[in-house]
Amino acid sequence: MSKIVKNISTKELSIPNVGTVKVGEQVTVPDSFSNPNFQVVSTGKGSDESETKTDTKAVASDAKGDKKTTTGK
Amino acid sequence: MNYLSDNAYLAIGVETTAGVAVIPDVFVPLMSESVKTVLNHSADRRMKGLNWKANDLLRGNRMHEGQITILADADNLGHVLNMVMTKGTTTGDATDGYTHPFTVGAGDTYTFEIKKGNFVKRYFGVYVDEVKIGFQDGQMTLTLTISAMGQVSVASVGIALSGAVTSLTLEDNYDIQPNRGLVVGDVITVGGVDVTLTSVDAGGYAVGFTSTSITAATGSSVVLKPLTVSNPALSDPFYLGNTLFGFGVDESAATTASGARSTATPVYDVEITIKNNLFKQNGSNRFDPAKIVPQTREAQITITQLLEDEEQMQFWLNRTKQAITMVALGQNINPDFSTQEKLTLKFNNVKLLEGEAPLEVGSLIKYVQNFEVLYDNSDAAAMSASLINNTAAADY
């Protein structure tokens, strides 16, 4: 079983045994994958969370990054 | 099954409320760690007609503490400073880097997760009691002595599960609120099945998840599952070879001296210790420390430089005020080489506690100086820090 996740962090991230994932990029990972910097886009079979199952490696907008600011705490 | 330390991770996350755990999202490469939970179990010595010391153990007051050593790159150093000092308003942008000022005061608490084989130990309400900034093989290292308000890692099933279930009640042998430290979104393994938590009951015992078929007897283990590691492109640590030390009669003069290699003073070893002297006494409310609070702050600096004249000896004998500014330069941020990672530590008023110049055959005389960092009345500050890195303000 695998699932598709999207990098919702503000940085390009490398995942051991998967590779480098740009901001907003989607990638297929094993079902056991669990990381708060990534949002599940779709799961292998009949997922309620399914939005797309085909756009892996397609760079999308960065939802988390959009709310980042350069000032304040 | 065996587990390799190198597969472990340290993940950290800023807490919005001290002691309320978050799922950490910043992975910090570890050098070593020795954080542990001190349970303080004691033998039950009540007299029961036995000729043996005890037949059980009783609970004790717990502490969660230990040391973590990491290399100080500009991004993880920002989080460490955010733990031990108060961060001001960040300026800058992704192109030229973000500048974060820090002053003496309360920092943020963090959740730390350390992977131990097939489970993680999550410490929440993590405070830094002491940070040592030093250099090993010319690389800047940070040794954090931390204390935490609690931990969650492995628990036990309190009420047996069978068939399709949507919640799990945890055993309270370890803690009076066994679900404390778990967070919605956590993945736990129970009865050999992974479930993602959708609720953590305020009553302290139950956690909820979507309907899942699980068979698990009372007492079966419940494991907080490790995250999958994700690393950004790591910066090099700061190097002693690209660090400048300025000495002066006051902060302004020291900072000016640290501004150029020609005016900076070469040093051969340095260790800076910043202490928060945490109050972490056990009391009522919990078996863990109910409160951890910084007390009086202090700092010391040990510097080794070549003995060149009698001046430092005079300063030591006379308790003369000096100021020290340390500027550590890192990798370029703007591709046009106009900006780079930069740590600036300013100590406004330092005086020599000790100054020694031991003699060794065939060696130049080195002067080992131990400074106490003092509050400066004129500057109304004892120390401050500034850091330029690639981490946006929202990540703190």
Image: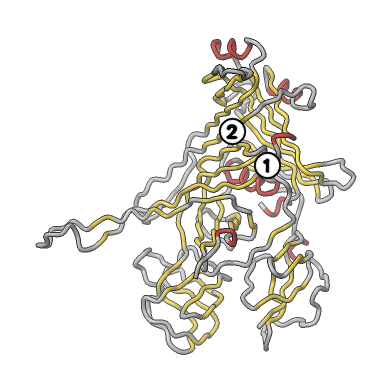
Q: Is residue B295 left or right of residue B171?
A: right
Q: Is residue A65 left or right of residue B282?
A: right
**Mark 1 surroundings: few (<14), some (14-19) or many (≥20) residues within 10 A:** some
Tell me where residue B141 sits by quadrant: top right
Q: Chain of mark 2?
A: B
Amino acid type, callout 2: Ile
Q: Residue at x 61, y 26 (%)?
A: B303
Residue found at the very far left of the displayed protein:
B49
Residue found at the very far front of the displayed protein:
B362
Q: Element under label 2?
A: strand
| Residue B311 in picture, x, y percent from top left | 63, 11
| Residue B378 in picture, x, y percent from top left | 64, 20
Amino acid type, callout 1: Gly
Tell me where residue B183 sits by quadrant: bottom right
Colouring mode (rainbow / by chain / secondary structure / one colour)? secondary structure
Q: Chain of mark 1?
A: B
Query: Counting residues from the N terminus, which is met first, the one under dot 2 or under dot 1?
Result: 1
Q: Where is mark 1, residue-wise? A: B88
Of tags 2 and 1, the one toward the viewer is 2
Q: Where is mark 2, residue-wise? A: B272
| Residue B385 in picture, x, y percent from top left | 67, 36
